[in-house]
Amino acid sequence: MTQSDAASPTLSARLLIATPNVRDPFFARTVILLIDHDHEGAYGVVLNRRADPPLGDLLRRLELDNPRHLQRAPVWWGGPVQPEAGIVVYLHEDGLPAYEPAVEVTPELRVSWSMDLLRDVSKNLGPSVFALYLGSAGWGPGQLERELGEGAWIPVELSHRLLFRDNGESTWADALADIGAAPSTIPMGDAARA
């Protein structure tokens, strides 16, 4: 680890709450699960933008089993980077296979791009608590730090209460309420001009 690495703490395994400064329609009023952050950049998934089609339709297109309880389950828009790629965020359970590739966000929370995981989900053999995201949000080296400095994001501790919801409409307001804030109490910064 270099001295510059030690001087810039990681924000991995946190949530980013968009402030009212964020005017980009992709990211306004979003909450992002930040999966990884280091000197090379950062990436995560938007938690509260629903995508089409529902999970049952997607499983059918992939020619996978389609259990009744998953037919209307939501699929989420994770961000504009590789929107055709699926990312499964799930709670790890004893007895689950070690899906590869995968990232351990916290000891309980995992992220994987494994087709085997999606196949197991379709057969009721995978994790019981999960969400599927299409695409991700990404930042190049120093980009997230600049946006934080401009007041675009509020980094907060990861709250499982904001994950795995059926309806993401209240997620942004709930995330702000968790830190005792409301949109009207957040000062506007440089990001408002973006």
Image: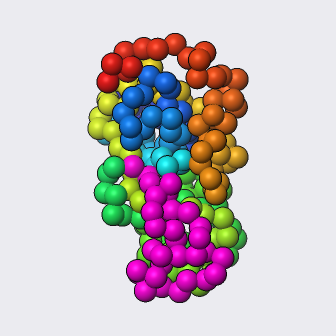
Q: Quadrant of the C terminus?
A: top left
Coordinates of residue 117 in the picture (x, y in percent): 51, 74
Coordinates of residue 163 in the picture (x, y in percent): 63, 50
Asked if the stretch drawn in magenta spans residue 2, the answer is: no
Coordinates of residue 107 in the picture (x, y in percent): 63, 54
- Picture layout, residue 83 above or below residue 152: below
Instruction: Work out whether residue 188 or residue 139 is closer to the camera in this orientation and state it.
Output: 188
Coordinates of residue 32 in the picture (x, y in percent): 50, 42
Q: Quadrant of the N terminus?
A: top left
Q: How is the image coloured?
A: rainbow
Q: Is residue 173 visible?
A: yes
Instruction: Work out whether residue 55 or residue 135 is closer to the camera in this orientation and state it.
Output: 55
- Picture layout, residue 79 above or below residue 64: above
Range drawn in magenta: 50-79
Instruction: Work out whether residue 98 or residue 182 is closer to the camera in this orientation and state it.
Output: 182
Q: Which residue is at 39% across, 19% downward?
A: 192
Q: Is residue 19 left or right of residue 163?
A: left
Q: Is residue 116 visible?
A: no
Label tally: 0
Q: Which residue is at 46% across, 82% downward?
A: 60
Q: Which residue is at 61% across, 83% downward?
A: 67
Instruction: Work out whether residue 85 or residue 109 is closer to the camera in this orientation and state it.
Output: 85
Q: Which residue is at 35% across, 44% downward?
A: 138
- Picture layout, residue 142 above or below residue 160: above
Based on the displayed image, in which of its 4 quarters is residue 177 positioned? top right
Asked if the stretch drawn in magenta spans residue 60, the answer is: yes
